[in-house]
Amino acid sequence: MLSAVSPVVGFAARTLSAYLSIALCASYGVFISIFLRILGRERIAQWMVARAFKYVMAITIGITFEIEDPNRYLDTVRPAVFIGNHQSELDVLMLGCMFPKYCSVTAKKALKYVPFLGWFMSLSGTIFIDRKNSKDARQAMAGAAREIQTRKQSVYMFPEGTRSYAKEPGLLPFKKGAFHLAVQAGVPIVPVVVANYSHILYIKDFVFKSGKIPIKVLDPIPTTGLKAEDVDELTRSTRELMLKEIVALTQKAQNRPIAVPATSGDGVVHASGADATLS
């Protein structure tokens, strides 16, 4: 209602509603994680918290994400490394709408000991990446790969490594951590693409509106038989596929022609050190 009076005031009101919703759902997450751990079902804790985001934020900010997953990969492919494009803080709600069961986010191991946040992560089955004394992403991912295999737990990662805040559909260069993890664990990569939603949320112009945003789950990419030396090509080809799908999905959602943006280099971050390659 405030948006009709003043777009800036409406932006502030919807932003406040979003952060209050996140605080409410995070508090719920701590309690539900404890309860599910007692029952031995902590591996679905993040899924349940994600669903709370979906329904609470649909009411408070009027935004939802519509999932196109005709082959039900979100329900049937496990374990896997799910990856997606990262546009803004609104991706918290995106995860709420599509997050699979028996899936968790990843986090650096140091966060495990942070009060409240680390406790929730530990209770809800987060897979921690040990970057201490690791010289490269392969070493950093070794422990996480073992957890995926033994616990049959999928993970969701953003290979861009940070939010793009893009006005037009596109992708930042991909870091290779998620791909090293999938190859080491021997599990498929499942790309999930989200249409550019700058027409709904664009912070620089104080745009924050209600609406529906499409998500498309792409076919799983097998990693069986791949080795560390294959990761660069796997990263490059996956990024290229996702970029084309994001443009097509955005064209459909916004009903306007969009050209596939040019990529500088191969779109892969080539650097040494776990921090440089871990998303």
Image: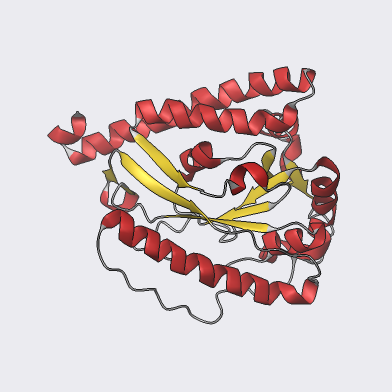
Locate residue 271, reporting x and y percent: 68, 73
Q: Is residue 266 above or below residue 111?
A: below
Q: Is residue 3 left or right of residue 166?
A: left
How is the protein colored in the picture? secondary structure
The residue that appears at 36% across and 27% down in the rendered structure is: 60
Residue lying at the far bottom of the rendered structure: 265
Q: Is residue 28 above or below residue 236?
A: above
Residue 224 is at least partly visible in this image: yes
Locate residue 14, reporting x and y percent: 32, 33
Q: Nearer the viewer, residue 78 or 238?
A: 78
Residue 268 is at least partly visible in this image: no
Q: Quadrant of the C terminus?
A: bottom right
Locate residue 255, reporting x and y percent: 25, 58
Residue lying at the far left of the rendered structure: 5
Q: Is residue 118 left or right of residue 163?
A: right
Q: Is residue 15 above or below residue 128?
A: above
Residue lying at the far front of the rendered structure: 71
Locate residue 193, reporting x and y percent: 49, 56
The residue that appears at 52% across and 26% down in the rendered structure is: 52
Q: Is residue 6 left or right of residue 129?
A: left
Query: Hey, which quadrant is residue 189 in on the image?
Result: bottom right
The number of numbered badges drawn on the structure is 0
Q: Is residue 202 left or right of residue 74?
A: left
The residue that appears at 40% across and 49% down in the rendered structure is: 214
Q: Quadrant of the N terminus?
A: top left
The residue that appears at 68% across and 59% down in the rendered structure is: 178
